[in-house]
Amino acid sequence: MSLAEGIRAVVRQPGAIELEAFDVPTPKPDEVLLRTRTTLISPGTERAFFLAMSNTSASYPLYPGYSQIGDIIAVGEAVDDWRVGDRVASIGNHASHVVISAKLCHRVPDVLTDEQAVFFNLIAIAMQAIHKARIELGESVIVLGAGLIGLFAMQLAKLSGGLPVIAVDQHARRLDIATQLGADGAFVEDDRALSLIRAYTGREGAAVVIEATGVPDVVNRALHLAGRRGRVLLLGSTRGLTESVNFYRDVHRKGISIIGAHETTRPTHDTAPGWWTQYDEHRVALNLLAANRLYVDSLVTHRFHHAVFLDAYELLRNWDGNALGMVIDWGRMGDDER
């Protein structure tokens, strides 16, 4: 039985996206139905799946999106912890209504706006790499790539005690934001990053390098920038093959540890040191935002009403390096859109 008619984004085939109407289902006993307030586009990942780039495993039709804030409008008969009207964060897609397991929802702290809270999942994706990196107080950290994931990794590395924490990117605007968010250095050139590390630590390379660009060739740069016995975290999902890695020079001789940090490597149950569950990282992300330990306001570069959602994906298609947080407003829908 359908409770209402909703609208959602759908990629029919690579490069072809539209908004479609759908029948909103009744939640199962352990589910809740959410009326969406806000969703967030994850630019790198959503663009890759939209355009069927290398190392994506998308099948079509594809329903994009995985960061949503909404109000509960119906609960399954077995749900005891949630009530109609609760505002929650979920990994729902870009849609006016989302049905999801009640166990996957998080209450949004009252001090957070929808626009702030909707970053929770991208923060958690960066967080799982920081947990795996096991950064110690005073260790130097280089983050390659100052997109959303890289900027969150940079902030979290500082919270973990990294010093210095340095951002490297090709876009001046992103480096300006990294500086505003507390980076100890923000550079286009690798040599300047290494010079700052030497000044702070006396080391010839970083203790931790976090690759957050997803560009295959940048993996070689990450290995080069890591110091002896350093750790290289592969956080960005590379879209292609990394050519000509000199494992003897850049890994073996230096004793480098390479750590895969894809979000799907998390445990399903039971958080352990270095290996947190997605649920716990979502919870911590919201708590850090509420405590003003992480900052997101300067990361919003574009706002779209859901009615012009396709304009957001045209921006993804054409790629603007200055685009960061792209927020979709699903509120203020007329009766004909419900």
Image (cartoon, rainbow, N blue to C red):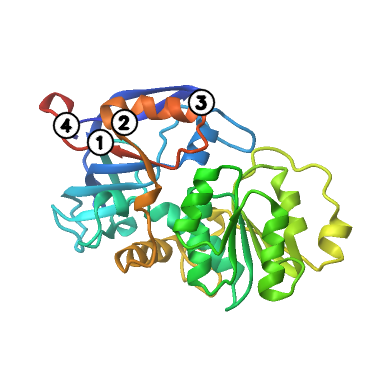
Question: Which amino acid lies under the numbered mark 3 shown in the image of this protein?
Answer: Asn
Callout in the foreground (4, 1): 4
Placement of 109 over or under 201, stated as above or below: above
Name the N-terminal-most of marks 4 and 3: 3
Quick one: 249 or 100, which is closer to the camera?
Answer: 249
Mark pair 4, 3: CA separation: 28 Å
Task: Describe the element under mark 3 as helix, strand or loop.
Answer: helix
In the picture provided, is 297 more to the left or to the right than 166? left
Question: Which amino acid lies under the numbered mark 1 shown in the image of this protein?
Answer: Ser
Q: Do the residues labelled 4 and 1 touch (CB within 8 Å)?
A: yes
Mark pair 1, 3: CA separation: 26 Å
Res. 30 in view: no
Mark pair 3, 2: CA separation: 22 Å
Indicate the quadrant where residue 136 lies. Answer: bottom right
Name the N-terminal-most of marks 3 and 2: 2
Name the N-terminal-most of marks 2 and 1: 2
The residue where tag 2 is placed is 8
In the picture provided, is 21 more to the left or to the right than 58? left
What numbered label is drawn on residue 318?
3
Name the N-terminal-most of marks 1 and 3: 1
The residue where tag 4 is placed is 333
Name the N-terminal-most of marks 4 and 2: 2
The residue where tag 1 is placed is 96
Task: Describe the element under mark 2 as helix, strand or loop.
Answer: strand
Callout in the foreground (4, 3): 3
